[in-house]
Image (tube, rainbow, N blue to C red):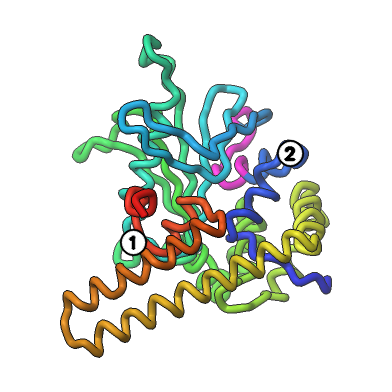
């Protein structure tokens, strides 16, 4: 393959491949493999939910989600891809989950109607480096002493692609022999690295081997190639990369300026003022509040108040 693949960790690209009605069968296969669903537990049907904006009934704040679906058995599943290092991700995920969970219930409905709500968070940095080197961790609310569940309505999956790449490079053969069903999808998400301007040709070669035996992986590769060749997508991709590089460069500049002044408070204020200036420019260019928050580290409220 000679296509210059667009990094699937870019949210707009991830949504195009995994969040479209005409590619629903790919999304079903992806979720089944990531969640480890087999046999009668497999997701057979789903409905995409329009969650570009979900407002909280109490404070009116807006939360945006990436790809969200309802399954035929009533589960609500959200997948978020976060390319920027955000160490507050555990709190952020819990907050976003609570928004989605509470929005599932209409006024006057019984709590028994609340659906199992599953969050899959995909990052490219170790969030719990001191606790584990596993690339896929799963969380529930359990009792401290005996480990039984408080409720099965909450389920978090954290996938760290940076840890996956470390293990893939070291234990490539072992991982392949395990025949882990999520492996080809994680390889697909890791194959292109926008930040490092890399395309892992050895991963693509292995993906082609997987594609010979798994129809949905084969179709996903074809769709990914077609989407990457689309001129509109390439323009969007280049614009996102330029914005990302500019933001990082500007933030580093404000940081250096603050250090030269020699005052810790000056450093903090200089960086924050720079972030606000950048955020204001991005708002004018039509970037969403969630996208600006991810690039600058400012809160949604701070951005709305600009």
Residue 230 % position (x, y): 80, 60
276 versus 267 height, above or below: above
Q: Position of residue 51 (x, y in %)?
A: 54, 36
Q: Residues within 10 Å of mark 2 (few under 14, many from 20)?
A: some
- Residue at screen point 58% across, 38% down: 37
Among the 4 quarters of the image, the one containing residue 256: bottom left
Count of numbered circles on the image: 2
For the N terminus, give its image quadrant.
bottom right
Q: Which residue in the protein does label 1 denote?
A: 87
- Between 283 and 114, the one lying in front of the other is 283
Along the line of sight, the residue nearer the viewer: 126 or 65: 65
Q: Secondary structure at mark 2?
A: helix
Q: Quadrant of the image for the C terminus?
A: bottom left
Residue 95 visible in rendering: yes
Say which residue appears at 30% left-offset and 85% top-offset: 257
Q: Does the magenta portion include 249? A: no
Element marked by disc 1: loop
Labels 2, 1: front one = 1
Residue 102, position as x, y percentages in the image: 38, 27
Residue at left offset 36%, top offset 16%: 111
* Position above or below: 60 against 249: above
Callout 1: 10 Å neighbours few (<14), some, many (20+)? few
Bounds of the magenta span? 31-41
Q: Residue furthest bottom?
A: 260
Q: Are marks 2 and 1 in contact (CB under 8 Å)?
A: no
**Viewed as shown, does residue 40 lie left or right of 206?**
left
Residue 37 drawn in magenta: yes
In the picture of the structure, the residue carrying the numbered disc 2 is: 25
Residue 255: mark: none
Q: Where is residue 8, by image quadrant?
A: bottom right
Cα–Cα gap, marks 2 and 1: 33 Å
Residue shown at 23%/78% (left/top)? 267
């Amino acid at each position: 393959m000679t296509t210059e693949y667009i990094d699937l960790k870019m949210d707009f690209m991830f949504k195009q491949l995994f969040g479209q009605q005409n590619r629903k069968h790919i999304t079903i296969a992806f979720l089944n493999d990531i969640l480890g669903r087999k046999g009668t537990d497999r997701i057979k049907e789903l409905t995409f939910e329009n969650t570009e904006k979900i407002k909280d009934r109490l404070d009116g704040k807006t939360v945006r989600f990436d790809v969200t679906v309802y399954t035929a058995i009533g589960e609500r599943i959200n997948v978020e891809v976060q390319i920027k290092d955000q160490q507050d991700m555990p709190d952020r995920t819990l907050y976003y989950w609570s928004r989605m969970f509470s929005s599932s219930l209409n006024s006057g409905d019984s709590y028994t109607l609340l659906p199992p709500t599953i969050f899959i968070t995909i990052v490219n940095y170790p969030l719990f480096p001191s606790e584990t080197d596993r690339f896929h961790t799963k969380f529930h609310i359990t009792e401290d002493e005996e480990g039984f569940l408080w409720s099965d309505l909450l389920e978090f999956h954290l996938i760290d692609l940076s840890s996956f790449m470390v293990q893939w490079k070291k234990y490539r053969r072992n991982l392949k022999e395990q025949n882990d069903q999520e492996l080809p999808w994680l390889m697909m998400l890791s194959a292109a690295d926008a930040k490092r301007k890399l395309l892992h040709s050895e991963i693509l070669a292995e993906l082609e081997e997987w594609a010979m035996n798994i129809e949905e992986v084969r179709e996903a590769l074809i769709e990914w190639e077609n989407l990457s060749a689309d001129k509109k997508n390439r323009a969007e991709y280049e614009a996102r990369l330029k914005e990302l590089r500019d933001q990082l460069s500007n933030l580093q500049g404000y940081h250096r300026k603050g250090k030269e002044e020699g005052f810790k408070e000056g450093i903090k204020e200089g960086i924050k003022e720079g972030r606000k200036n950048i955020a204001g420019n991005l708002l004018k260019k039509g970037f969403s509040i969630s996208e600006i928050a991810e690039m600058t580290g400012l809160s949604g409220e701070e951005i709305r108040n600009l």
